[in-house]
Amino acid sequence: MLQQYQHILVAIDGSYEAELAFKKAVAVAKRNQAELILIHIVDTRAFQNVSSFDSAMVEQVTENAKSTMEGYVDQAKKAGLDKVSFSIEYGAPKTIIARDIPKAKNIDLIMIGATGLNAVERLLIGSVTEYVTRNALCDVLVVRTDLTNKPALASTKKPADQPQED
């Protein structure tokens, strides 16, 4: 019997690579008739350096993330998915994506973009993708190519003549 995924998690961070992972996750979820769960993590470490912690800043970040995630849910539904939801979490992205959400939501596949950091950032704080691939409780698919299977790094943004998908 072929492996069939039931609950697919895709991490959304606003990067081009995350968008590619989302698009491929929609296709995989459709083929498997699976539930697609989108996750955005507000990295609370970014707020530790703010001397006067401002809750309005967190609210603004949350509202922006909610708006973005609702757009992705709409895209997935227009593509034919019925079972799609999103969650906005707060904390360290690595452990939330690799362990917390997979346990809580019975995730059997995580789809994640190859990289969102530059070489110096990866050296200093480590790649979320690398951590997830080493520590996840389920299968992980690292998306490195666009929908035409061309390397994502060859183009960090869509060409002007490429039609935008709704």
Image: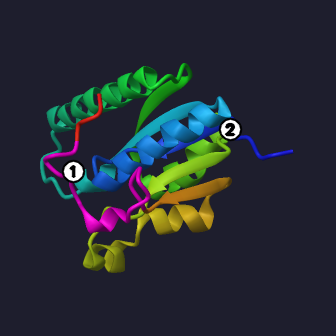
State the image coordinates of residue 154 (x, y, percent, origin top left). Answer: 28, 68
* Nearer to us in this view, 58 or 166: 166
Residue type highlighted by circle 2 = Asn
| Number of residues whose C-alpha sits closer than 10 Å to that of mark 1, classed few (under 14), some (14–19) or many (20 or more) | few
- Name the secondary structure under disc 1: loop
Label 2 environment density (alpha carbons within 10 Å; few <14, some 14–19, many ≥20): some
In percent of the image, x 35 and y 55: which residue is there? 17
Magenta: predominant secondary structure element?
A: loop
- Residue 37: x, y in percent? 52, 34
Q: Which mark is residue 49?
A: none
Q: Which residue: 52% across, 24% down?
A: 81
- What segment carries the magenta color? 145-162
**Residue 19 image position (x, y, % from top left):** 35, 46
The one of 7 and 149 positioned closer to us in this rendering: 149
Q: Residue at x 37, y 27 (%)?
A: 75
Position of 51 with respect to 145 (left or right) is left
Q: Which residue is mark 2?
A: 106
Tag 1 residue:
158
- In the rendered image, the residue lying farthest to the front is 161
* Measured Cα–Cα span from mark 1 to mark 2: 34 Å
